[in-house]
């Protein structure tokens, strides 16, 4: 089996280079029409933070033992984000780049990736790697137990998980989430964690109805899910703050607050039967190749 190392993926600055090493299999299967999981990574000016996240993701998914694809959506970056991904593309058939012509926003980037994904499960995760990719096992278990959507939560913690967040961001986040709870989404402790897993059917329905291009898209997806009786399960995860956040706590919070009321009005006509009719027309039990349990992947 032919292998080589990927070195010097991207410059960290004009003088230094960030060097990484990994074994690359150039003889793997061609792109699977329906891999087990699609991982969507939205990226805007992420030339420095993206390489280690991609490396960790590929390394984990290789060991996971299931077909996969990684879709990086470059949201109009002005740096070398696309160049980074293109280097991975050349040696990894599972990696795909979607390059948007301008900066539309995180919500638009995630939606674009999800609607171009082929996986039976669709995960979106942040480019900074703040949530370790291995945490997806917890979300898969939630899907296997009956959820249509499993969302990582920094607010719901267990003895097995740890959250390392800046105090002021934690306080603002809790205040904002409380407002969301009162107005739109009761009983969701953390709407904004950038680590969410969808069944293919739930993703197809939710992202087709999504309208938000900005950071409030998570709220819209969860509100749509609630209106449609799509089962959402919140799961404690490990998370750490990574410097370089693109979120402006003042201006983006104001925009998101306005969006809360917009979503309530815009989606007032969504009915539970809309999703159920789609699910019934695509019953997975008719697929002879589908495993009886998604969680089989964790024990195989």
Image (tube, rainbow, N blue to C red):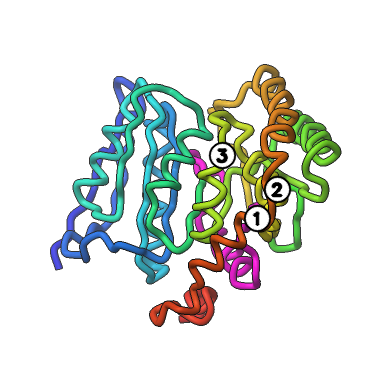
Mark 2 — residue? Answer: 154
Is 118 on the left-hand or right-hand side of 94?
right
Q: Residue at x 66, y 17 (%)?
A: 251
* Magenta stretch holds residue 140: yes
Q: Looking at the rendering, which quadrant does residue 73 occupy?
A: top left
In the figure, 275 relative to 46: above or below? below
Residue at the limit of the structure toward the left, as seen here: 2
First in sequence: mark 3 vs mark 2: 2
**Can I make out residue 235 in this image?**
no
Q: Which tag, 3 or 1, sits closer to the chain's start? A: 3
- The residue at 67%/33% (across/down) is 266
Percent position of residue 190, x then y: 72, 45
The residue at the point 50 percent across, 27 percent down is 105
Image mark count: 3
Pick whichever, 42 or 287, lies toward us.
Answer: 287
Query: Which is more foreground, mark 3 or mark 2?
Result: 3
Camera-nearest label, 3 or 1: 3
- Depth order, front residue of 63/105: 105
* Residue on which the image places disc 1: 237
In this view, which residue lies farthest toward the right? 182
Q: CA distance from mark 3 to mark 1?
A: 25 Å
Image: magenta residue range:
126-153
């Amino acid at each position: 089996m032919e292998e080589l190392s990927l070195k010097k993926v991207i410059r960290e600055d004009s003088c230094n280079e960030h060097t990484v090493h990994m074994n690359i299999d150039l003889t793997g299967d061609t792109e699977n029409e329906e891999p087990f999981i699609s991982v969507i990574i939205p990226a805007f000016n992420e030339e420095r933070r993206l390489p280690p996240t991609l490396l960790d993701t590929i390394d984990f998914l290789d060991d996971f033992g299931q077909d996969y694809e990684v879709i990086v959506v470059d949201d109009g970056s002005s740096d070398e984000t696309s160049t980074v991904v293109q280097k991975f593309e050349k040696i990894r058939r599972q990696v795909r780049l979607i390059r948007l012509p301008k900066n539309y926003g995180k919500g638009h980037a995630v939606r674009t990736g999800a609607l171009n994904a082929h996986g039976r499960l669709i995960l979106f995760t942040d480019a900074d790697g703040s949530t370790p990719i291995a945490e997806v096992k917890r979300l898969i278990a939630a899907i296997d137990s009956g959820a249509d959507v499993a969302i990582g939560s920094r607010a719901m913690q267990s003895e097995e998980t740890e959250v390392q967040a800046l105090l002021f961001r934690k306080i603002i986040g809790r205040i904002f989430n409380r407002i969301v709870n009162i107005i739109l989404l009761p009983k969701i402790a953390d709407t904004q964690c950038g680590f969410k897993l969808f069944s293919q059917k739930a993703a197809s329905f939710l992202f087709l109805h999504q309208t938000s291009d900005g950071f409030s898209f998570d709220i819209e997806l969860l509100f749509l899910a609630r209106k449609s009786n799509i089962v959402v399960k919140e799961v404690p995860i490990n998370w750490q703050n990574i410097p370089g956040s693109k979120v402006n706590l003042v201006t983006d919070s104001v925009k998101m607050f306005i969006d809360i009321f917009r979503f309530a009005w815009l989606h007032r006509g969504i009915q539970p039967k809309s999703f159920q009719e789609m699910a019934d027309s695509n019953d997975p039990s008719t697929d002879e190749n589908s495993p009886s349990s998604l969680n089989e992947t964790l024990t195989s």
